[in-house]
Image (tube, rainbow, N blue to C red):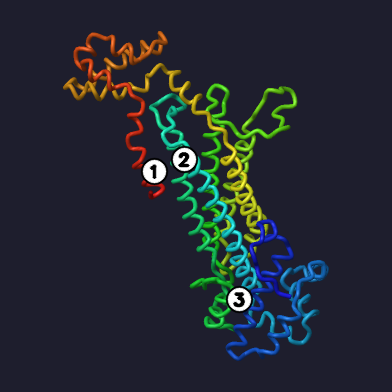
Amino acid sequence: MIERYTRPDMGRIWTLENRYRAWLAVEVAVCEAWAELGRVPAEAVKTIREKADIDVDRILEIEQTTRHDVIAFLTSLEEKVGPDARYIHLGCTSSDIVDTANGYLLMQAGKLIVEDIEKVLASLEALARKHKGVLCMGRTHGIHAEPTSFGLKMTGFHAEFQRHLERVKAGIESVRVGKISGAVGTYAFLSPELEEKALTRLGLAVDPHSTQIVQRDRYAHFFTSLAIMAGGIERLCVELRHLQRTEVLEVEEGFAKGQKGSSAMPHKKNPISAENMAGLSRLIRSNALAAMENQALWHERDISHSSVERVIMPDSTILADYVLNRLCRLLDGLVVKPERMKENMERSYGLYFSQRVLTALIATGLPRQKAYEAVQRLAMQSWETRKSFPELVKADPDMHERLGDARLAELFDPTYYLKYEDVIYKRVFGN
């Protein structure tokens, strides 16, 4: 019997049996549309629905002779359905079925990926809210810059993954189309009305103009959206890997009881999940290049794209599903170390206050370059002597004369850098 899709997992979507069932769903939708237009008897459609079923082994056996997968599929159906099978595939070409089924399958896979991204967003928001106001060192080029909060770090990734979600949704809409338009897209033995009726049954939109196939810029859009998302996953994983380095150690991946980090060194706790996801993200991105290479085909169609898609359609969607779920587990089990963040802030002797002192000097009327040189002189002295930059500033006669005790006293409060944290949270989370 025809099987409708009810929350399959990602791997099941791409099994050979499920692929054939998607083809069958398309064939039946076309038969139903023909019946609605009065071309195929309703009783024949009833028979097709009752008797048509998938026998993977038989299809593969027939394909050994036909060397054509769709013909093997249709032959197998004819064996099961009997005389009424003559109405199956009426007026269609193979790509009507395959490309429409691809849209059907990619739509199902895309829905799961959307759900996965939404879970990641929930995990990122939980981290952002929990660690709002938790000061940590912001770094540029890997060097201490100015303070931020760990909550703001996670808020930034949440904002990015919201963009990934919108791009993936747009990619799904791009491939959520089918075509029942015949050998070169002219409806010679079909009709636009039939096409619309059949595709509506499948929850697909009509491709406004297809040739023998749905054009592959649509697929390139979908796989590129996954690739960009994979870049975001790797960016987050690289950040977490850096933060777990021994010299930093501001966060740590969860480490299960009995887990081992190294065969040689019992002390090791490595960021293996983040490293694995960084590697898998590269695979997803490389598959997007293959999807873009598939855009250029001969005339109304060749099949150079087909072999590629048999690999990248399951591989990229399964990888995306796996990586997003693994990322959720990493984020939910992340060990965050606020005390270590505080320690690390002091490793640069308060030099992160340098811009605040610079702007304070400029506000007194001192030319910018002179102010910059004055602050830089004390900053270099602090770094070379490992002495507190705030204390050197307070002790400097020129600084004291220009800024005064009251101003100097208020310059070195690290919470100053979070004064607009609430505004950023409201922009990202909306409340």
Q: Check residue 112 in the rendering and tell me which mark sits there, or answer none.
A: none
**Residue 277, horizontal then vertical, whole percent:** 61, 41
Figure quadrant of the N terminus: bottom right
- Cα–Cα span, label 2 and label 3: 54 Å
**Residue 64, horizontal then vertical, whole percent:** 82, 67
Earlier residue among tags 2 and 1: 2
Location of residue 302 with respect to 401 vertically, above or below? below
Which residue is the site of mark 1? 425
Earlier residue among tags 3 and 1: 3
Report which quarter residue 156 is drawn in: top left
**Residue 430, horizontal then vertical, whole percent:** 38, 50
Q: Check residue 183 in the rendering and tell me which mark sits there, or answer none.
A: 3
Which residue is the site of mark 2? 128
With 145 as the anchor, is 357 left or right in this view? Answer: left
* Three-letter amino acid code of the residue under disc 2: Ala
Q: How packed is label 3: few (under 14 Cα within 10 Å), some, or many (20 or more)? A: many
* Three-letter amino acid code of the residue under disc 3: Ala
* Three-letter amino acid code of the residue under disc 1: Tyr
With 254 as the anchor, is 401 left or right in this view? Answer: left
Element at label 1: helix
